Image (cartoon, rainbow, N blue to C red):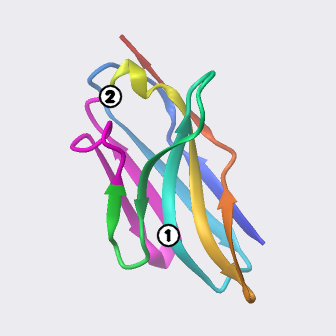
Amino acid sequence: QVQLVESGGGLVQAGGSLRLSCAASGRFRSINAMGWYRQAPENQRELVATITADGNTSYANSVKGRFTISRDNAKNTVYLQMNSLKPEDTAVYYCNARARVFLTVADYWGQGTQVTVSS
């Protein structure tokens, strides 16, 4: 139905930058909100940032001013620009999309991409 493929994770030193991408494909009528979540070892998955179809954004307090979420609706792709990275940003980052498939709206998830920030 909806496949999300993430890319852009990796290893970076503290203070560095990474850009994550997530492309959606499949048989859906529309995609509403898209977002990024992360999960560190032994922690629960937490919201990082979301963006609606018309571009309204929201961020976790811990990333405000450092991360920027954006999307290209023509490409069904969402991005997360991460600057001034800190070791505590280390986690697996998951892409999320709320999509309409036929008459049903549901959340879909990517497979996750590892982000590691060394001190």
As drawn, the label of residue 15 is none
The residue drawn where x is 30% and y is 42% is: 61
What residue is disc 1 on? 33
In this rendering, the count of numbered labels is: 2
Q: Is residue 75 left or right of residue 44?
A: left
Q: Quadrant of the C terminus?
A: top left
Q: Amino acid at mark 2?
A: Leu
Q: Nearer the viewer, mark 2 or mark 1?
A: 1
User: SS class of the residue under badge 2?
Assistant: loop
Q: CA distance from mark 2 to mark 1?
A: 25 Å
Determine whether 15 is above or below 54 in the image.
above
Tell me where residue 95 appears, x and y as whole percent.
Answer: 57, 52
Tell me where residue 54 appears, x and y as whole percent.
Answer: 37, 79
Determine whether 61 is above or below 99 in the image.
above
As drawn, the label of residue 85 is 2
The residue drawn where x is 50% and y is 70% is: 33
| Segment tinted magenta in the rendering | 59-85
Depth check, front residue: 42 or 26: 42
Residue 115 visible in the current orientation: no
Mark before the other along the chain sequence, 2 or 1: 1
Tell me where residue 78 appears, x and y as whole percent.
Answer: 47, 61
Q: Does 67 lie within the magenta span?
A: yes
Residue 63 visible in the current orientation: yes
The residue drawn where x is 74% and y is 79% is: 27
Tell me where residue 105 appears, x and y as whole percent.
Answer: 67, 78
